[in-house]
Amino acid sequence: MTILLQSVSFSDWFREVANWAFILIALPTLFGAWRTVTSNNIVRAVLYLVVALGGTAAMFLMLGAAFVGWTVVLVYIGAVVILFLIGIMITRAPLGADTQLSHSTDVKVPAALLSVVLFGVMATALIDAFGARMIEPFEPTSTSEMANILFGRFVVPFEVVSFVLLAALVGGIAIARKDDEGGEQ
Amino acid sequence: MTIIQFIIVGAALFSMGLYGVITRKNAVLILASVELMLAAVNINMVAFDRYLQDQLHSGQIFALFIIALAAAEVGIGIAIILMIYRNRQSADVDELNLMKG
């Protein structure tokens, strides 16, 4: 397998229409992620998570991974976010603005510092390693192609993941179930 | 399209998720931040799958596995939070200090 080391200059990058689409996707994604971790309103924080995850799904579509993209939409936005909202309702979190959702400044400042340093280290290393290398023009991966791989080469891991999911959900029911006679353990 | 634009967005999402995990007190929001970090990993998986021109599309398959495991994690996580809420009447992780000496 050969990886072509084709690079692109900064001005050429902006000439490609797909990259403008990428910027239009990336900015809402990052904004949604930022509001998810900073919003003082718990319901809004979870709904901003929809924006961030929808952005990642759009990026998967850009990368020609349509099946993964729509799986993200169905599983994350359709199921996981609803689970979060159910969790919020069950734990009766205050629905308005609430400063108790996050730690105070003496935790936020070191955490922000740590995140910025982590991002700086990763960005420097990644730019150093990959620079402006292009993704070669590609054919989008069709769903039938994904199915052939998933149920061919990866069928055993697929079944294992199915059992993990089943066990986790049965375990979740077992943990969350109320005991019938109100018996305290 | 370059590879770096996707993995930089992935790195930024991961860092924000880390910030959320550290600063949030509400257990549901900590789980949401963990989801952000997993989404960042998924972006890297799919981007490198495309970049390396993998014939087996291992990156996309692994992204699917990560999505399934994230769903399992959220299911268990919400169940545990519900149990904690029943016992402590709070979803605030700072109040879970029963094991503190």
Image (cartoon, grey):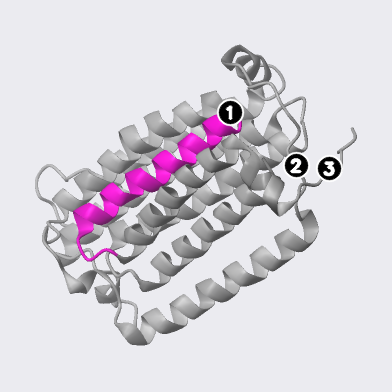
Tell me: residue A52, above or below residue A121.
Answer: above
- Residue found 39% across the figure and 65% down from its top: B20
In reply to whether residue A50 is colored magenta, the answer given is yes
Type of residue at label 1? Answer: Ala
Q: Chain of mark 3?
A: A
Q: Which residues are magenta?
A: A39-65
Cα distance in 3D space between marks 3 and 1: 22 Å
Residue B68 percent location from the top left of the image: 48, 35
Name the residue that disc number 2 marks: A134
Q: Chain of mark 2?
A: A
Which image quarter is the N terminus of chain B in?
top right
Question: Could you tell whether B83 is left or right of B37 in the image?
Answer: left
Tag of residue A65: 1
**Nearest to the observer: residue A177 or residue B37:** B37
Q: Which element carries disc 3, helix, strand or loop? A: loop
Question: Could you tell whether B44 is left or right of A116 in the image?
Answer: right
